Image: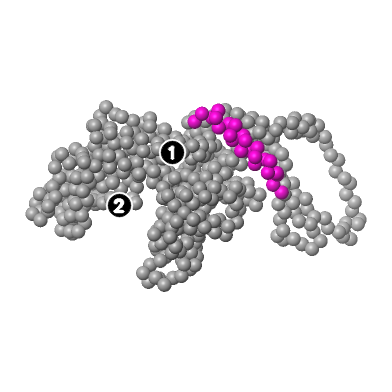
Amino acid sequence: MADAGAESLVSKKGANAPIWQCFGFVGDENGKPVDTDTPICKLCMRSVSAKADHTASNVCAWLREAVCEWGLEDSRISAITTDNTSNVMAAARDLGWPLITCFGHNLDLAVNAAIQAQKRRTDRVFGLCRSITGAFSHSWRRKRALMAAQAELGLPQHSLITDCVNGWGSKQEMVARIIEQQQAIRHVLADDRKASVTLRWQDIDVLTAVNEALKPVAELTNVLSGETYVTSSSVIPMLSLIHEDIMAPSDSDVALATEMKASIVHKLDGKYADEAVRLLLRKCTLLDPRYGGTFEDSGQLKPLIAGEIAALRRGGPAAVRVKEEDRREGQTPVRVKEEDRGEGQAAIRVKEEGRREPGPEDASVEQPPAKKMRTLGSLLGKRATAASAALSAEEQAKAEIAAYLTEPVIEGDADPLQWWRLNGHRYPMLAQLARKYLCTCATSTAPERLFSAAGNVVISSRAQLKPDKVNMLVFLDRNLD
């Protein structure tokens, strides 16, 4: 397995060890994507013992060391995805890497900003929710009474949920569970003399309004947190969906819900106002056959993408790779190349085997040379090749983009990578860019999961592990799935 020419990075700064994960495409020895169930390859690159201050310069040095260790060039890094911590963002800018901020973290910041804007009305109900969940989590008698009340009232046998700082959507989950179990909670707390919390109907009204504002966006982060499918191309369509549908004002909304929705939309738009970030996401969306040019003005992107393709072509054709393995004495290496293929035709693979000295068994048999048949393709192919060569790389790219944009978009649940595997030979230039940009991650949940793996490695009984041993154990734990 070799990379197909582009990687994206996701990073997360933790209290003890920054951990980075690399994403790319699974390909053959020539960098061509292969047909696998999970064509996106994820790899834990390194975990670092961060005893020094987490300044931008130090984070920059750690990132540079990780990339150099794996022999990755800056030109092959499509983007780095991270949360909104200023030091990691500054480090990425110092390195000159394209930067995308985590969609989940941006959404969480937008939700918290909306709640903070309504602090006078929401502080009490959130504090009340935490007090109620704490009252039941610290008393097994109340838990038992809650289960009995749920059975008596015909409610789901669900436990209460407490929000957490780093848990995206946990506030909405806590509120929704309190609303669901409000009758059982009142039943138990009304008979408990030691309970000091009460759930009034005014509190339920506020909680209902908050739930109506937060519930529509609760599942968005989970949708864009996958590691085995394309996510970056869906950010702009998701923002459009939030504007036009999910966060659109409704006649049934109360004033509090309407104000919170407007605040969430405003804050989220600000997170993607940067032109460089927006341009990168627009390229991802355009190269996804599920969207094409339906969400952004493709006219502005055409010359930019054509120029980028021309720049890649000016870098020179890739050298023919030579297989050195299994080389026998007296044989030359096997050279493998792909002939030009026309639309709808299968690739022709030609092997030039090494010559061997004729043996005695060949002396008596003389094979006549095979007569070559002239075909229509051999007669007219040179004219077609000459006409194609007359066009500049940028003109060829523009023609390819125009043809691609006339393609009908595929279903939303279809796999865009499968589409490119089947149609990449028709758009070879765009396929190269698709491999570069579609491996970019929309969220930084991948290293968050790495922290869980690291927590299972560095337990209290292994407190004396050296940083290099931790790095190796986390590497093996994550990459040997």
Give whichever of discs 1 and 2 has the lower sequence position: 2
Locate residue 314, reporting x and y percent: 68, 41
Locate residue 321, reporting x and y percent: 71, 52
Q: Main secondary structure of the magenta part?
A: helix
Question: Mark 1 against mark 2, which lies toward the viewer?
Answer: 1
Q: Image check: 395 left or right of 139? A: right
The residue sitting at 38% across, 34% down in the picture is 242
Locate residue 163, reporting x and y percent: 28, 50
Q: As shown in the figure, which amino acid type bears the numbered disc 1?
A: Tyr
Q: How many marks?
A: 2
Q: Image check: 383 left or right of 82? A: right
Dot label at residue 164: 2
Mark 1 crowdedness (10 Å alpha carbons): few <14, some 14-19, many ≥20: many
User: Magenta stretch containing residue 310, yes or no?
Assistant: yes
Decide if residue 11 is in sight here.
no
Q: Image check: 450 left or right of 383? A: left
Place residue 200 in its image quadrant: top left
Residue marked by disc 1: 272
Q: Which residues are magenta?
A: 296-319
Locate residue 418, reporting x and y percent: 55, 41
